Image: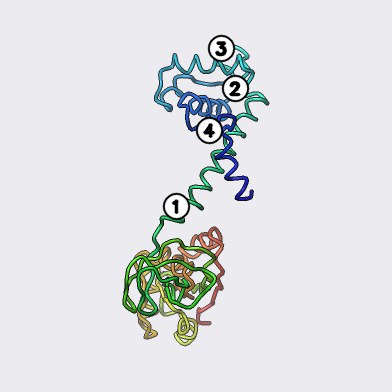
């Protein structure tokens, strides 16, 4: 949807559904009730809807009666209600308007008042127009024009934290690769089964090295590589990769499968390395 369409939703006045839904608590309640009926139809418990919306069951009953009269809800016996085609269209119309308004808030309002924290790549002064970029997982701001730009809100020296407002454009960014190395549990040999030379080869180019499980930790230490992360390592590696850092994680076999599923769910690129000695 275009920006013009989003703004259109804000300027049509009383005929616009957004105008009605935001100005009338009654209309908000009717929308919520229709959504609740759609979710639980045909057996609708008015008491539960009343508790969820914070109104009396009598008020819910009156609202439903009105919605039935307007053709937005059909009744087929005591407590049995269904949203009609007209009711669905009314819900979708209002939902689209609310969605447009939310996009307007996120993109046109919050984006303008939000202040992003970056590292000053050089001495910066209040009001400077800066280019914003990622480097080694950190956000930087410098005077060189880039695809993403913003305005400095206060003076900052090089390598100090600096506030950047009115951020526009796309920050050029590439997610990091995750190298996953499996280590057997102690019952199956633990760190003794790992080829240290292969482990060092995998980890030498990684920006962050993590261990999950004591067997994995000891395997790294024995190879002369103290891990950067141990506690909270799984989510730490994911966060680092999102910030563009190549990572290596040495992980015990019983945690291995679940971690791969987690990587699949967040759509990060990974490669599996076999370090087990023959």
Kindly check if marks 3 and 1 are in contact, taking CB atoms under 8 A apart as contact: no
Q: Nearer the viewer, residue 273 or 177?
A: 177
Residue 267, horizontal then vertical, whole percent = 56, 62
Mark found first going from the N terminus, 1 or 4: 4
Q: How many angstroms separate mark 1 from mark 2 (CA)?
A: 40 Å
Seen at 35% across and 78% down, the residue is 123
Marker disc for residue 78: 3
Q: Is residue 111 left or right of residue 119?
A: right
Mark found first going from the N terminus, 2 or 4: 4
Nearer the viewer's eye, disc 3 or disc 1? 1
Residue 49 higher or lower than 271, as above or below: above
Nearer the viewer's eye, disc 1 or disc 2? 1
Mark found first going from the N terminus, 2 or 3: 2
Q: Nearer the viewer, residue 143 or 57?
A: 143
Mark found first going from the N terminus, 4 or 3: 4
Element on which disc 2 rests = loop
Q: Residue furthest right?
A: 85
Q: Which residue is mark 1?
A: 110
């Amino acid at each position: 949807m275009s920006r013009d369409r989003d703004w259109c939703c804000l300027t049509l006045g009383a005929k616009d559904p957004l105008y009605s839904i935001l100005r009338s608590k009654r209309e908000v309640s009717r929308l919520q009730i229709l959504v609740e009926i759609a979710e639980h139809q045909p057996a609708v418990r008015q008491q539960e809807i009343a508790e969820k919306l914070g109104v009396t069951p009598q008020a819910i009953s009156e609202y439903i009666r009105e919605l039935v009269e307007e053709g937005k809800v059909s009744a087929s016996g005591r407590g049995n209600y269904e949203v009609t085609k007209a009711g669905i269209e009314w819900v979708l119309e209002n939902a689209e308007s609310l969605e447009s308004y939310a996009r307007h808030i996120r993109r046109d309002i919050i984006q303008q008042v939000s202040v992003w924290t970056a590292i000053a790549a050089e001495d910066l002064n209040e009001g400077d127009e800066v280019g914003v970029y990622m480097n080694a997982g950190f956000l930087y701001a410098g005077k060189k024009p880039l695809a993403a730009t913003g305005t400095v809100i206060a003076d900052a020296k090089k390598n100090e934290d600096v506030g950047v407002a009115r951020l526009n454009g796309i920050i050029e960014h590439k997610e990091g690769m995750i190298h996953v190395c499996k280590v057997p549990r102690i019952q199956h040999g633990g760190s003794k089964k790992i080829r240290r030379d292969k482990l060092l080869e995998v980890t030498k180019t990684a920006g962050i090295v993590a261990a999950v499980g004591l067997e994995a930790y000891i395997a790294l230490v024995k190879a002369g590589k103290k891990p950067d992360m141990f506690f909270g390592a799984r989510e730490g590696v994911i966060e680092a990769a999102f910030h563009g850092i190549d990572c290596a994680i040495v992980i015990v076999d019983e945690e291995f499968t679940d971690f791969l599923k987690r990587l699949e769910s967040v759509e990060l690129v990974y490669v599996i390395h076999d370090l087990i000695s023959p």
